[in-house]
């Protein structure tokens, strides 16, 4: 196949992986580019995801295997698309690949991490613990090759990882490289970021240890997370059995995110089940403006609502403070239905942080227009370029996968013009 008939997929999250494998299996060669060292995106950080409420590796492992078995997918990790020029059927692409400092001889034995003396915040766990500068995110990461973070690695001044590796897989002299190639069409699937809740001064995020975000809660509940799946308070490791969920943390707020982030209500209802299933005597209270559970998810809402140990309180949270002596969290809110202000004490508070498109802070390397909130306006994209998933609007995993599957045929048609 001619080079300019290939399809470029930007982003290796669930929607990007889906787009890549569906396009390749429909008969086109694909180049898949992911900016981090590992594929899977936000879904890899979840404990469970809708609609099946199964662990993320259920769906990811299938796509990883499809990529490994495909002779039509070339992929680059730790890579970013720097420049795109041309037109539908004939795009020129420039990709910058950062140094991983670990080559394909790596067998994932963990010797480099054990020898590495440099610790760093664990971004995969949203800073809830630390990891080594030589690291792998989790035991089913793909590709299963360690990476070295040069922001924390001491390089040749240390080189303990080099001495520890029996397979000559560590290369501290590895240089970044620039790759250029042609493609016929482009699928942008670069995903989303959680809203920075530290901007919400009244909710205590970033200041109070036992106030965490919904994505941090996913990591706490995950078997491969910092607490091996136990829902424990970050401050003291105490079991969190009385938890508050604060909805619309930044969303539907003209000073922050004016839109509904779509996934937050379902995420909190799901996380309530994590707590209730783990601790029989646990209690949860959800503070909400409106509970939005579209379509078939309504029944899930009823199931959670009918649990006598779950309270749903309609009203905005005004302030969150900490009892310094105990580490407990005090939530002050309005109870609209009761017509009064209330004050409650909890072990842990989860903020339902909103969804921000990656294009808010990092624009696509193609000409297009964006909404004031950073979402791509699809009609403004050049012919042959397609945006999927959360780049256009907040959506869940199932919707992202549907869009990615649907755009595969369009991208092939564009590439063959």
Image (cartoon, grey):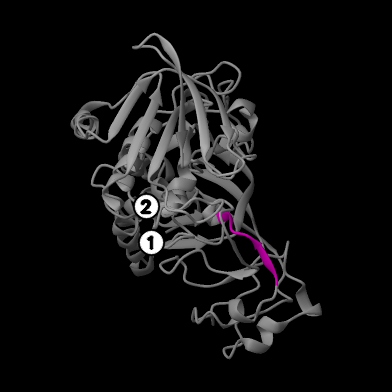
Image quadrant for the C terminus?
Answer: top left
Identify the residue at the far front of this view: 325
Mark 2 element type: loop
Tell me if I can see residue 14 in this picture: yes
Extent of the magenta region:
118-123
Depth order, front residue of 236/373: 236
Q: Which mark is residue 271?
A: none
Q: Based on the displayed image, in which of its 4 quarters is residue 120 positioned?
A: bottom right
Position above or below: 395 against 131: above
20 on left or right of 372: left
Badge 1 or badge 2: first in the primary sequence: 2
x, y (%) of residue 302?
20, 29
The image position of residue 190, as x and y in percent, is: 51, 43
In this image, 240 relative to 332: left or right? left
Q: Which residue is mark 2?
A: 47
Q: Is residue 398 magenta?
A: no
Distance from the alpha carbon under mark 1 to that under mark 2: 8 Å
On the image, the x and y values in percent for residue 383 come to 48, 32
Seen at 32% across and 24% down, the residue is 292
Task: Report whether 247 appears left or right of 97.
Answer: left
Question: Is disc 1 surrounded by few (<14), some (14 to 19) or many (20+) residues within 10 Å?
Answer: some
Q: Are marks 1 and 2 in contact (CB under 8 Å)?
A: yes
Q: Secondary structure at mark 1?
A: loop
Q: Residue at x 63, y 38 (%)?
A: 362
Q: Is residue 393 visible?
A: no
Q: Residues within 10 Å of mark 2 (few under 14, many from 20)?
A: many
* Residue at the image point whose x is 62% and y is 41% from the top: 324
Position of residue 310 relative to residue 39, above or below, is above
Residue 223 is tagged as 1
249, 76: nearer the viewer: 249
The vertical placement of 278 against 214, above or below, is below
Return the x and y of residue 339 as percentages of the image width and height: 39, 8
């Amino acid at each position: 196949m001619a080079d300019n008939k290939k399809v470029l997929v930007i982003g290796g999250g669930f929607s990007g992986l889906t787009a890549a494998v569906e396009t390749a299996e429909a008969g086109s060669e694909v180049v898949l580019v992911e900016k981090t060292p590992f594929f899977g995106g936000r879904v890899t950080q979840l404990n469970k995801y809708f609609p099946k409420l199964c662990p993320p590796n259920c769906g990811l492992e299938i796509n990883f295997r499809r990529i490994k078995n495909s002779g039509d997918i070339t992929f680059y990790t730790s890579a970013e698309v720097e420049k795109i020029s041309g037109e539908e059927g004939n795009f020129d692409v420039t990709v910058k690949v950062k140094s991983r400092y670990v080559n394909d001889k790596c067998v994932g034995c963990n010797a480099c991490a054990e020898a590495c003396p440099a610790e760093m915040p664990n971004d995969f766990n949203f800073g809830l613990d630390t990891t080594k500068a030589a690291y792998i995110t989790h035991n089913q990461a793909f590709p299963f090759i360690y990476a070295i973070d040069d922001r924390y690695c001491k390089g040749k001044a240390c080189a303990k990882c080099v001495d520890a590796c029996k397979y000559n897989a560590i290369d501290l002299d590895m240089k970044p490289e620039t790759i250029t190639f042609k493609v016929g069409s482009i699928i942008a699937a670069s995903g989303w970021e959680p809203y920075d809740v530290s901007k919400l001064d009244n909710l205590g995020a970033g200041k109070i240890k036992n106030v965490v975000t919904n994505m941090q809660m996913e990591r706490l509940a995950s078997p491969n997370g910092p607490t091996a799946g136990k829902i424990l308070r970050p401050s003291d490791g105490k079991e969190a059995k009385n938890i508050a969920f604060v909805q619309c943390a930044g969303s539907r707020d003209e000073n922050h995110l004016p839109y509904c982030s779509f996934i937050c209500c379902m995420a909190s209802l799901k996380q309530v089940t994590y707590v209730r299933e783990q601790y029989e005597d646990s209690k949860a209270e959800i503070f909400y403006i409106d509970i939005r559970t579209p379509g078939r998810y309504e029944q899930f809402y009823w199931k959670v609502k009918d649990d006598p140990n779950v309270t749903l309180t309609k009203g905005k949270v005004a302030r969150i403070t900490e009892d310094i002596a105990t580490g407990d969290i005090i939530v002050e809110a309005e109870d609209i239905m009761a017509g009064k202000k209330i004050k409650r004490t909890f072990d842990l508070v989860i903020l339902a942080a909103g969804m921000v498109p990656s294009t808010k802070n990092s624009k696509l390397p193609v000409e297009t227009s964006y909404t004031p909130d950073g979402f791509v306006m699809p009609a403004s994209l050049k012919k042959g370029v397609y945006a999927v998933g959360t780049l256009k609007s907040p959506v869940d995993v199932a919707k992202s996968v549907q869009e990615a599957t649907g755009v595969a045929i369009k991208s092939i048609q564009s590439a063959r013009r």
